[in-house]
Amino acid sequence: MSGKDEQQKDAGGWDYIWNPRTNEFLGRTAKSWGLILSFYLVFYLFLAGMFVFTMYVMLLTLDDFTPTNQDRLVTPGLMIRPRGELLELRFSPENTETWDAHAQSLDTFLEPYNDIYQAQTNDDCVPDQFFIQEDSAEVRNHPKRSCQFNRTVLEECSGLQDRSYGYQSGQPCVLIKLNRVIGMLPGKEGLSPYVTCASKKEDVNLGQLAYFPSNAAFNLMYYPYYGKRAQVNYTQPLVAVKFMNLTMNQDVAVECVVVSNTIAPGAERDKFAGRVSFKLRVNVFWKIKN
């Protein structure tokens, strides 16, 4: 191959990038590039416009205060405070470090339940009946009001009489709450759902239990729940259970369940449906006197 042929071959490779004879860049003229870029610009602007339009139409169907789609549970779950690690509460009354975190956790949790704060933000409702708040025609009744749940209702488990919530004396308090479900009416004929606790093992005796309030009930006046945005000051009702004489130095498996004439019993395969299970252990190191 001669030197002239090699120059023509090299020139042909560069001509694909820019051909000075036809004024083509990468095989296309300026007009061709302009047309294809204009097509893709219009095409993607159309897609973006369709996306914005469909999002706008979807947002028109949403309620700012109530979720459009709700996977309502047949049986809401229960939860405890303090939760401990893996729902296990192990402590030694004489060792403050083993239970101080539990007491501090309950202090923080119960702070919004202080009577003064409740009187300022919530209503003194009529007990044993639902607090239903309907919207007035096209005028939305927001924010909806909430009923007071005063910390003093928990009495010995309020942390006001005993700052250790019974942990220092080996009689721990555990707070129980029913998970929130928008629009749920748990109970009928004036009967509120209530909590009952027992040992998961038949051969283990929990001893005496004290409930606060004494009927261990979630009063009907705290229902229905309208949602976090619609009912900004909603105070979730609580039930406290105090274990008066637990067996020391032994793991005690406790199960608390909610009983109601409208809430279906939880299925056995779902350990959180209408119930909560946790373990308690009070370690006491007896001093042997010579």
Image (cartoon, rainbow, N blue to C red):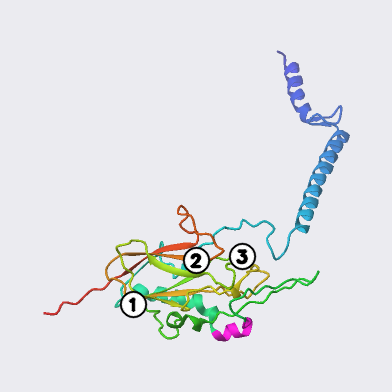
Q: Please indicate whether residue 9 sits to the left or right of residue 192 in the image.
A: right
Residue topped by disc 3 = 184
Give the main secondary structure of the magenta stretch.
helix
Answer yes or no: do the residues labelled 2 and 1 have beta carbons within 8 Å? no
The residue positioned 67% from the left and 56% from the top of the image is 69
Magenta stretch containing residue 168, yes or no? no
User: Which quadrant, please, contains the C terminus?
Assistant: bottom left
Place of residue 220 in the rendered image (x, y in percent of width and height, measured from the top left) = 58, 73
Secondary element at image label 2: strand
Mark 1 and mark 3 lie on one chain; the one further toward the N terminus is 1
Residue topped by disc 1 = 96
Q: Which residues are magenta?
A: 115-124
Place of residue 195 in the rendered image (x, y in percent of width and height, measured from the top left) = 47, 69
Q: Please indicate whether residue 288 sits to the left or right of residue 115 in the image.
A: left
Mark 2 and mark 1 lie on one chain; the one further toward the N terminus is 1
Q: What's the residue type where badge 3 is placed?
A: Met
Mark 2 and mark 3 lie on one chain; the one further toward the N terminus is 3
